[in-house]
Image (cartoon, grey):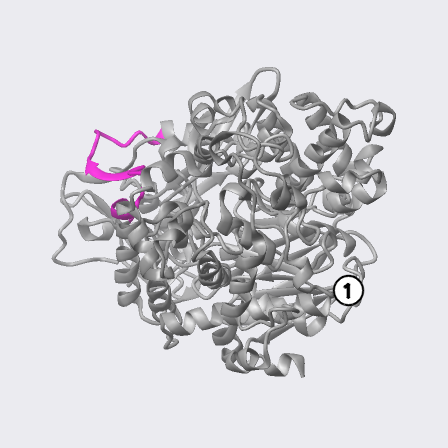
Amino acid sequence: MGRRVIIDLSREKSVKEQLKEELLKSYLGGRGINVKVLHDLVSQNLDPLSPENPLIFGTGPVTGTLFPSNGRHNVTSKSPLTGILGDSNSGGFWGPELKFAGYDQIVLVGRSRKPVYIWIDDDGVQIRDASNLWGETTWETDRLIKEELGDEAIQIACIGQGGENLVRYAAIMNNLARAAGRTGMGAVMGSKNVKAIVVRGSRGVGIAHPELFEELCKDAFEKIYRAASYESRSKYGTTMLISIYNTMGVLPTRNSQTGVFEGAEEISGEVLLEKYVVKNKACFSCPIHCSRYFSMKNFYETSGEGPEFETLCSLGARCGNSNLESILYANNLANQYGIDTISTGNVIAFAMECYEKGLITDSDTGGIEFTWGNHEAIVEAVKKIAFREGFGDILADGVKRASEKIGRGAERFALHVKGLEPPEQDVRGLKAWGLGWAVSSRGADHLRAFPLPETTWTPEEVKETFGTEKAADRFAYLGKADMVKHFEEICAISDSMEMCKITLIALKALKPEDAAKIIYAVTGWEIDDRELLRVGERIVNLERLFNLREGISRRDDTLPERYLKRPMPEGPSKGNIVELEPMLDRYYELRGWNARTGIPERKKLEELNLAYEVS
Amino acid sequence: MCARNSRVDVLKSLHLVEPNKCVGCRICENICSLTKEKCSNPKLSRIKVVKLERSGVDEPTFCRQCVDPPCAKVCDVEAIHRDQNEARVIIDEDKCIGCGKCLPVCPFSALTLHPDRRVAIKCDLCDGTPKCAAWCPTQAIIYAESFENPSLKQTSRSINSLKGSDKGDC
């Protein structure tokens, strides 16, 4: 184990090298080893779409094994959407296959002169012509490559027209419906003229202690099956959150003008399951199988896997859209074109609010009526964005740039943190999530901190870990910085082991101790939960250093004005705003970061063996 | 793979209950390769999940322990035989020469050549406690009493018809 392949697209050469054990022990894998490479290779102010920007794919130490939900991979680069850390994590089957071929990491550098795809077949690494694939959807690309190579079981990560056209939030898709969606990694791949990375591996993953490993796996599976939310997670997956969030008054509706949606029931996971779901689907080695395959044959006719809660909301409630079939259809389109559904829903909702407030008219939009709930406009906009046609060209740059172009105060409706459009919670009713968005190393994001204890732990449980029962009150501020810091560490571990956070966090089934034991059983490394948390903290800090170098400081650790100053107008979270600054002060204190600048103190960096990174 | 003191239940066999029950997680492949090879390598698994992604199909394929096994018929060195008492088909690794003749005749693509040992490998029902069935999260595969002759043709027909639908766009 522990190999990487560096592929220089400009010179059409590749080189393989062993990863040092010390590097793996310091950063684990995936997100951790990727940001290390990014920090080392990228110089300040580098254009993210230039050949020099590396595009990095990483797997984790237990990826490809029986251990539950380990099969994820991380894609890292400098983001063309935000200009800071670009990072996205995907499930599916691609990561394990890369591991079976014997690699922990792929680093793409340079730019190919013509469209190519990379074919990694165990030790063989080829750069192959992809001129016949350029212009095709991700689904067609998947089909054509499997046909060309004569193997249905190969794994393909590819871009669609979104990545080719440098949509700043283009995704890299695998298994048709699985996305490394956030922060525009697909645009970086498109800028390199790489259509796909295709892998096949027969080497497998060695297990240092097979008997212990099987025992630990058995224990982990049993804990998962016993978890209180296993049944609902395995039936609805994340889609159950539409109803839950609406009941809490935190379901982003009409560009987060409110947190309750009158059409929530129509787009709920319950209705999706009843009307359209054919069967459940799983990622590699995952007993939760929270994904679903659906089929419909009405006004909109299509079938496919998904969508997740985030998409149901971004293309649904956020756009005032209660037409579920249009969401399923638009989700499939976004998957085929390879664009991030969270950012896509956000830019459309932003356009709708601009349209509502009269900042844009039909003459700006090329005749598309961006009225709330106009599902045909949503579907049309998805196409226009992917091909950068007409008004879609402006929306393809994300809400921040689009609002600057539109001007006339449109910035007020452009919801983003550090340039990244937010996910689907209204943080006025979820204070820890608000802090999580503000400090996240990739911009507005729920999966950097994923502070679920705020709503799913008992007062006794949060008191034990975060020192106050208040931490389980979603409207309270006490203990939230402590929660965000701790869970940022857990998320960094999860993303670097390439484990799913539903298993590691949402189900409350597995703990860092379990993660440490399984790493030992697979790799033989002596590691405990304390050391793992230190690795998590190191990763968070290195990401901070990367962002600081790009000009980020405390003033960027903030939220859109809507959440800070406009009280929630109605519903169960009515009257709430986010009082961010006191949480931020406490967060910096816990992190050992300077309260004024947000820069990690020297002592902290030395403690994490990161001091040399800033020398 | 020829086990002595076998505990295989005479009447039991592995069955795919219903294709839509399989969620395609490949846990069966993982536990199989861990059990048989002490590593994690689905390519060495005796059970394989055929995935047709566009149509959402996941279908485990494995040896059905045929009553009249075509693999045994084509074997020139008589390395494969059906143990009538144990209701399973056994490959004698000492006799197998790795010619691969048995692979294409299997209607379920249930045999593989071991890349290192160069012998044919397939499911031996884990001597009566098949791990794949025990670990399957949805009980899509079960180890149970045989229904007459496993409905072989029916299953392969369903795979073929699904292959035909594995096309198309939005």
Looking at the image, which residue is at 63% across and 60% down? A76
In the rendered view, does A538 fall on the left or right side of A420? Answer: left
Say what secondary structure mark 1 lies in. loop
Counting from the top left corner in percent of width and height, residue B4 is at 15, 59
The quarter of the displayed image where residue A478 is located: bottom left
Q: Nearer the viewer, residue B101 or A33?
A: A33
Looking at the image, which residue is at 60% across and 69% down? A595
Q: Is residue A28 visible?
A: no
Instruction: Assess whether residue B140 is covered by the magenta stretch.
Output: yes
Vertical placement of residue A209 versus A397, above or below: below
Q: Chain of mark 1?
A: A
Counting from the top left corner in percent of width and height, residue A447 is at 52, 52
Counting from the top left corner in percent of width and height, residue A41 is at 71, 72
Looking at the image, which residue is at 63% across and 43% down? A565
In the rendered view, does B67 fall on the left or right side of A119? Answer: left
Q: Is residue A254 visible?
A: yes
Q: Nearer the viewer, residue A8 or A533?
A: A533
Near mark 1 (Cα within 10 A), the count class, few <14, some 14-19 or many ≥20, is: many
Q: Amino acid at mark 1?
A: Gly
Instruction: Assess whether residue A506 is covered by the magenta stretch.
Output: no
Counting from the top left corner in percent of width and height, residue A36 is at 61, 71
In the rendered view, does A6 fall on the left or right side of A112? Answer: left
Q: Nearer the viewer, residue A443 or B10?
A: A443
Q: Identify residue for label 1.
A: A110
Magenta segment boundaries in residue numbering: B132-153
Q: Which residue reaches farthest right?
A: A363
Q: Which residue reaches farthest top?
A: A298
